[in-house]
Image (cartoon, rainbow, N blue to C red):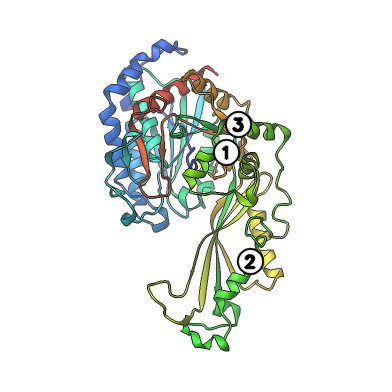
Amino acid sequence: MSVDRRTFLERTAAATAALAWPSVPPSPRADDLAPIFTEIEKRHDEAVARLQEWIRQPSIAAENRGVNEGCELTMRMLKDAGFDQVTKIPTDGQPGIFATLDAGAPRTLGLYFMYDVKQVDPAEWSSPPWAAAIVDRPGFGKVLIGRGAVNQKGPEATFLAALHAIRAAGKKPPLNFVLVAEGEEEIGSPHFPQIVRRPEVQAALRRVAGIFMPSAAQASDGQVTITLGAKGVIECELVSSGERWGRGPKKDIHSSNKARVDSPAWHLVEALATLVSPDGNEPAIDGYADKARPLSAGDKAMVAAAARRLDEAVAKREMGVDHWVHDVSWVEALERLVSRPTVNIEGLVGGYTGPGGKTILPHRAVAKLDLRLVPDMTAAESLALLKAHLAKRGFGDIEVNMTGGYDPTTTAGDAALIKAQVAVYRRSGIDPVILPRIAGSWPGYVFTGDPLRLPAGHFGLGHGSGAHAPDEYYVIESQNANVRGIDGAARSYVEYLYEVARG
């Protein structure tokens, strides 16, 4: 996640014998947190250095680059923060991590981490993406620039800084933790269920009060939006080739032959056009949206309240757009964002794409798609509908290769985990906006769905932006009094843990 997605995941873990936690009163008063906050400030440089080390280790699942090293580094950081039984979990893809921390507390919290990041093109960055440089950004203060800065290593490293500060203050965490981490979130978490559904992981997760993913939840103005779920997603490739089609060339040929030879590229374009309405804005896959759950009256009221508080002009400016689809109102744009399934083309690749022309008729063309799903749609059913739709229209030869994806998630607004978030934000002087779900996706369905049915959500003060984009950043020292830097974000995690413990 973003957001983020991106941006949400946690689990809990158990304390290392070598780093035994001193005893602490079970329900400390707010002023008892002062020694922890003092340690956060004292350990500022240490926390920044930890994040820089993490950023400097590339871990790109899509390129199979540095992922094992990234997994090992994450495991070491978890052990250093007090987790024991930190175990690497093999999968059919990249490894995951299962860890526990037993603080002897009455309650246990689940944590979701990811240690992989998106690909980069260093030529697009003002600062090298693996340098983890601290730079001055006008209006924000000192920020760390690097791939993974906000999605998701920045918030996760800040959460670990909070655990270090709790121990340094001579206290135990107020909760036990069960933590699950993966290294394939950025490619659609294709093997994450293999981690979470192991018997020992399921047994540990059955004891948790819910799942929390650290997040830098503040917008650039300091506002926070709480989301009660996320859309599901299917990431896939549609491949049209002369070999599979039985028409067109089996290798690239001179383009003059188009007068007498079929084109796999045009075949793909025709197939893509059947998936959406003529303007590209409404899914047209047969039966695809039939199970999409409409917004309830309560959901619509939630969106209307959010529309009154969120600035439409700012939203358009940040995305560089002038119009919503069909020129709908701000309220309807938000309703569509949280409630509509989508069919999106991420990229089209076929033939020659270099400078100048090459006058060929390519034998193969590929479209990369993502389909966003809402309750009560499922990834398996939606993929089957896509394939059936194409076959029915004479495009059954086109390969549909799902590379990742999962179902939507939903958490009740009155869940104790969400109430704790609201309480901490309001105590910090922030009245959060609440929306039914984010339009992005994360694999929380393995927690919120059967058999666990746990509440799940992102939490964390602090700000960053640029997930999946050049110059991704995370605020270290904030110039804006309404936005917390890394120390303030660490304090918010401490406050949240004690709030959940009191729940």
Image coordinates of residue 316 in percent, x first then y, are 52, 44
Q: Which residue carries the number 1 mark?
A: 447
Amino acid of disc 1: Phe
Q: Quarter-wise, where is residue 43 in the image?
A: top left
Considering only order in the chain, which callout, 1 or 3, is on the residue closer to the N terminus?
3
The foreground one among 160 and 215 is 215
Q: Nearer the viewer, mark 1 or mark 2?
A: 2
Considering only order in the chain, which callout, 2 or 1, is on the residue closer to the N terminus?
2
Q: Which element type, helix, strand or loop, lies under badge 3?
A: helix
Q: Which element type, helix, strand or loop, lies under badge 1?
A: helix
Question: Does the residue at mark 1 contact the one at mark 2 (Cβ under 8 Å)?
Answer: no
The foreground one among 209 and 364 is 364
Local packing at callout 1 (Cα closer than 10 Å; few below 14, some 14-19, many 20+) is many
Local packing at callout 2 (Cα closer than 10 Å; few below 14, some 14-19, many 20+) is few
Image coordinates of residue 368 in percent, x first then y, are 52, 62
Image coordinates of residue 266 in percent, x first then y, are 58, 75
Q: Residue at x 41, y 53 (%)?
A: 61
Amino acid of disc 3: Arg
Amino acid of disc 2: Ala
In the image, 136: left or right of 109? left
Q: Which residue carries the number 2 mark?
A: 273
Q: CA distance from mark 3 to mark 1?
A: 32 Å
Q: Which residue carries the number 3 mark?
A: 308
Q: Which element type, helix, strand or loop, lies under badge 2?
A: helix
Q: Does residue 384 sit above or below 164 in this rendering?
A: below
Say which quadrant the C terminus sits in: top right
